[in-house]
Amino acid sequence: MLDIVHLSKTYATASGPVTALDDVTFSVARGEIHGIIGRSGAGKSTLIRCINLLERPSAGQVLVDGRDITRLSPRELNAARRSIGMVFQHFNLLASRTVFDNVALPLEIARVRPGLARRRVRQALERVGLADMAERYPAQLSGGQKQRVGIARALAGQPKVLLCDEATSALDPETTEQILDLIRAINRELDLTVVLITHEMQVIKRIADRVAVLEAGRVIENGTVFDVFTNPCSETAQRFVREAIGQDVPARFAAVLEQGPALGRPTLLRISFAGPAASDPIVSELARRFDLNLNLVGGRLDEIQGQPFGTLTVLVDGGPAKIEPALNYLRARNMPVEVLGHVPSHDRAAS
Amino acid sequence: MSHPMTALLLDALLETLLMVGVSGAVATVIGLPLGVVLLLTSKGHIAENRAVNATLGAVVNAARSTPFIILMVAIIPLTRLLVGTSIGTPAAIVPLTLAAIPFVARLFEAALREVDPGVIQAVQAMGATRLQIVLKVLLPEAAPGLIAAVTVMLVSLTGYSAMAGAVGGGGLGDLGIRYGYQRFQPEVMAAVVVILIALVQATQSIGDRLVRRFSRK
């Protein structure tokens, strides 16, 4: 439905050119929610704004339904934009218009005849649960309600693609969940393709199907949310995942953790579970099979895209000779395991 | 105060209302598109055009920095061309309008600039043309600020209209000077001042009320 091909964007600034996007390529299939995550300054805002050409890319193509919109005339571009809805962090509603008239705006712009427009506006408002607020003004609404209006406005034009630019970043956690669930529901019911950008992995985890990790204008990781969560390759992705599922190394270990050879010290391991393997009795199996002393110091179980996923942090006694076969055993069973480091023996006792 | 004096005051009031009303209306009609163009062609806006913006800006600034009394005399040929005479109330309306246009255009530009750029972007993303952006977003969203700008202009015009006596324009200020100062009738001067104060107060409160009515924030 959407193909971003070798997209680059360079800004000329007083101190020379700045590259915001560097050869970005990815595709979004119809009906999919594709998340783009990155820190501020990673280029994610520029990227989403290049998709409907609010910003002109310096190079590359944006194919919507196979059609390169970077080559359109201004008139054609306006027509193409009508099939791309957009939802904003700060809602960007017109203060001078009622909820109803805000939602009707894209239809007025597209010159949809009034009777049909009114029907579509009512439908869109019902879908977001605001049918009874049609005559209110944005100033009379809460943040969550304003974003619902923003979503209804984007839906009224019956878009093929919905762009969400940090749509929940200005909302409290509870409202964020409601808005994300609403976007998910709309995506399912209408088979609507959604691209959302965010700096919060929780957002990705809750509703996205696929995720691209953006850093310094480049896509450094791209895959299903489950794959990126269970096996993050880049440092940035690993940090995002840790943020989303919480820090699993207790602070008292994190403070004394050392790399390098074990030198007789206990080793701290992080074992990740994914999919069906998550229900295996892995700890007792390791203890029995490899005669290891395992001390459970941290752990988390979660569900991503409907599949169980978790991590266990364990402290293991014994030198590399004993631990290495266990690591190989886990890896052979497709259970990612990381050696986090070693802790002084007295900390072992303290646990 | 004698009866003829009341009639004189009434006539002068009507002349003032005529001068302020007509020049204010014409200045609004011309100043609004001018303000829109000044904003849209400014840096980073939806129709950025440095040449147009700089030229218009320079003309507007030049017109604003010319003292009104000088402007009034300097454009007498134009006045004669437009209204057929260089004296009287209609002749005063021309320089008043000409002074008000750049003044209110800048006020309009400032009011329009207050519209949230995010809102403009949202509408661009919907595929709106520039004209649609102006008509459906900029003007309605800036309505309270635009009304406040018109109010400020009308109050200023009321003040400027007092100078219209220089070209025989009549009006309250002219009456005050001729009777109050030149004929030593301070009570006429006082009456003129009181009426002007009331006029400005009324203009301001009507303006304020309209601003509140259009304000949804």
Image (cartoon, coloured by chain):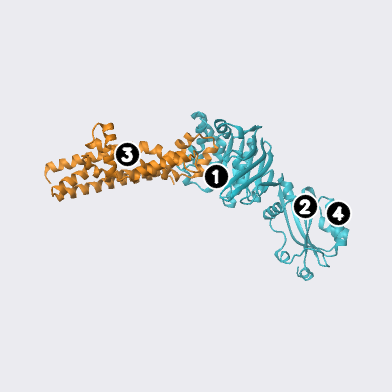
Chain colours: A cyan, B orange
Q: Secondary structure at mark 2?
A: strand
Type of residue at label 4? Answer: Tyr
Type of residue at label 2? Answer: Phe
Query: Which subunit holds the residue at mark 2?
Result: A
Residue A281 found in image quarter: bottom right
Circle 3 or circle 2, nearest the eye: 3
**Residue picked out by circle 4:** A329
Residue nearest the observer in this picture, A318 or A295: A318
In contact (CB < 8 Å): disc 1 and disc 4 = no
Type of residue at label 3? Answer: Leu
Q: CA distance from mark 1 to mark 3?
A: 46 Å
Q: Position of residue B185 (x, y in %)?
A: 13, 49
Q: CA distance from mark 4 to mark 2?
A: 14 Å
**Residue picked out by circle 2:** A273
**Residue picked out by circle 3:** B98
Screen quadrant of the N terminus of chain A: top right
Q: Mark 4: few, some, or many residues within 10 Å (few <14, many ≥20)?
A: some
Asked if one can make out residue A335 in the rendered structure from this viewpoint, the answer is: yes
Q: Secondary structure at mark 4?
A: helix
Position of residue B99 in the picture relative to residue B89 (left or right) = right
**Residue picked out by circle 1:** A147
